[in-house]
Amino acid sequence: MATHYSKARGKAGSHKPVDKTVPSWVSYKAAEVEQLIVKFVKQEKSCSYIGLVLRDSYGIPSVKALLGKTIGQVIKEKKLVKKIPEELMFLIKKHIAEMKHMEDNRHDMVALRGSQLTESKIKRLAGYYRAKKVLPENWSYDKTQAKLYLE
């Protein structure tokens, strides 16, 4: 997305280590990690949050190396998938916050442009998820009803 709307080039951020093996100091078994994932999903935690907690609190650097599948795949196998994907939900939350800001600051044209870009991203991502059959064909984003998606 960065190259789409800005003059920024390239990718930044942390990268997973090249080594795909489980370190010897990880004491958790695959079944225990799956139980932890299910526990966090039932507490309404997102996939990315679960990965952070497993890494930081439990010392599991890579769930995929340990289980042979991702956190999302485990959630899908256990049939605990949410109706709206995590990535789309985060964009909707961001758009709601931007709309609230625009109510208080009607003349903030920079924020208006950001809100328009976020809404555009939501609609493009929703189109992708409709094509992949993650969302129903008739699903559409309506910014007046956006707060209902969070329930």
Image (cartoon, grey):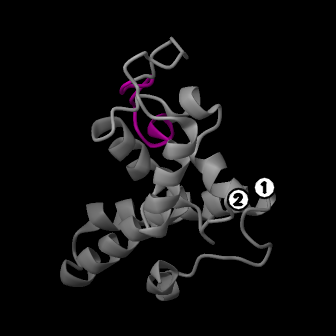
Count the numbered circles shown: 2
Q: Position of residue 39 (x, y in %)?
A: 46, 61
Left or right: residue 73 versus residue 3 is right
Identify the image quadrant of residue 100.
bottom left
How many residues crowd mark 2 within 10 Å: few (<14), some (14–19), many (20+)?
some
Which image quadrant for residue 104? bottom left
Q: Nearer the viewer, residue 64 or 114?
A: 64
Kindly give the residue lying farthest to the top in the view shown.
19
Q: On the rendered structure, is 117 left or right of 75?
A: left
For label 2, the residue is: 129
In front here: 27 or 76? 27
The span shown in magenta is: 1-14
Residue marked by disc 1: 132
Q: CA distance from mark 2 to mark 1?
A: 5 Å
Q: Is residue 17 above or below residue 11?
A: above
Residue type pointed to by label 2: Tyr
Report the residue at 26% width, 84% height from top: 103
* Residue 118 visible in rendering: no
Identified by mark 1, the residue type is Lys
Query: Which residue is at a point 60% across and 68% down the rendered structure image?
Result: 82
Left or right: residue 79 compared with residue 32: right
Q: Nearer the viewer, residue 48 or 134?
A: 48
